[in-house]
Amino acid sequence: MKTQVAIIGAGPSGLLLGQLLHRQGIDNVILERRSGEYVLSRIRAGVLEQGMVDLLREAGVDKRMDEEGMPHDGFELAFDNRRVHVDLKGLTGGKTVMVYGQTEVTRDLMEARESVGATTIYEAENVQPHDLETDHPYITYEKDGETCRLDCDYVAGCDGYHGISRRSIPEERIKTFERVYPFGWLGILSDTPPVSDELIYANHERGFALCSMRSKTRSRYYVQVPDGEQVEDWSDERFWDELKARLPDDVAEKLVTGPSIEKSIAPLRSFVAEPMQYGRLFLVGDAAHIVPPTGAKGLNLAASDVNTLYRLMVKVYQEGRTDLIARYSEVCLRRIWKAERFSWWMTTNLHKFSDGEDFERRIQQAELDYYTSSQAGLTTIAENYVGLPYESLE
């Protein structure tokens, strides 16, 4: 089998890239080691930046998002038992974010790909790229007990942190940067109305908390827990009590509780691999970088990588601009490091790092007070939250 662009990974980034390329007449095949049902079962983020919303519209998968998604003009920061509204729309010249679950984005993209008959090979085992520094790379994989080969012009590695794509780059050709935080997020999903129309990020002496949602009847809540904490140790009652303790009094009073339908703990870490290209392999999304969920940048950063690679491939196939290939990593990494900085800033200033009142705690309070009492500070937060502009390749 032969294609122009081989995409490893059928998560939202791989599917979005495939959809955009298909609409430009660029042939592509997606290889995924899991089943389609497994991919859809993953519970992930649901706050989409303005740039990603626009990219989904360009991909022609915006119908259900517009019908069921919830545009948000702002969000709130809570600290010192008070709330400060960050007016995203007013501070950024009209930009907003969209609350629409990653699972739904994935479903829309899967259905769009199926409707046009584009090829996705699920449960492809032992995927392995070859000859990446030549003009004729190819991928081998196993399907139904047989070894298969996919010849291609380029390979897009959209297979996440643990995937084969980044591991296919020789160690001496790649450098990684990492920060692991000493805590995680315990999150629950419940069929209860959200406590607020907007997201609330709370800094409290007991630890961080986040009030989010998936719809007008389904809520997503998180509390910071120490590293090594076990989900089994947290009953629903314990979770709700802890969440209430970390929210401003007027918010806690309105909180509607109920049985959890999903409960998990996510570790927090920052990770970047440089460069994001090796020969004809391009790393996309979590294959190259991870951010803490504070600030909702993970999926959105993957979308910005997709945007850059998609426009690069259009230039290559429609204009013969192979000279732009070398710019992929440089362009992506500029935006990635700025998003890493914002996620680090949000994580550093909203989470509990030590017990009691100490220097770091006082600095946190001063940072939050300064940024939220300054128009310039609020604008900086808003500009980063809605997403920095996508950079052109030229």
Image (spheres, rainbow, N blue to C red):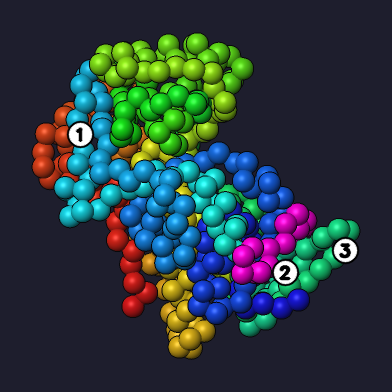
Residue placed furthest toward the front: 67
| Camera-nearest label, 3 or 2 | 3
Cα separation between marks 1 and 2: 50 Å
> For the residue labelled by badge 2, is the local secondary structure a helix, a strand or a loop?
strand
Range of the magenta residues? 114-127
Residue placed furthest toward the right: 145
- Along the polypeptide, which appears first: circle 3 or circle 1? 1
Residue 85's disc is: 1
Residue type pointed to by label 1? His
Instruction: Return the x and y of residue 369 as percentages of the image width and height.
Output: 16, 29
Name above or below for residue 374 compared with residue 156: above
Residue 146's disc is: 3
Residue 365's disc is: none
Residue 139's disc is: 2
- Along the polypeptide, which appears first: circle 3 or circle 2? 2
- In this rendered view, identify the residue nearer to me: 309 or 70: 70
Name above or below for residue 372 compared with residue 353: below
- In this rendered view, identify the residue nearer to me: 34 or 329: 34
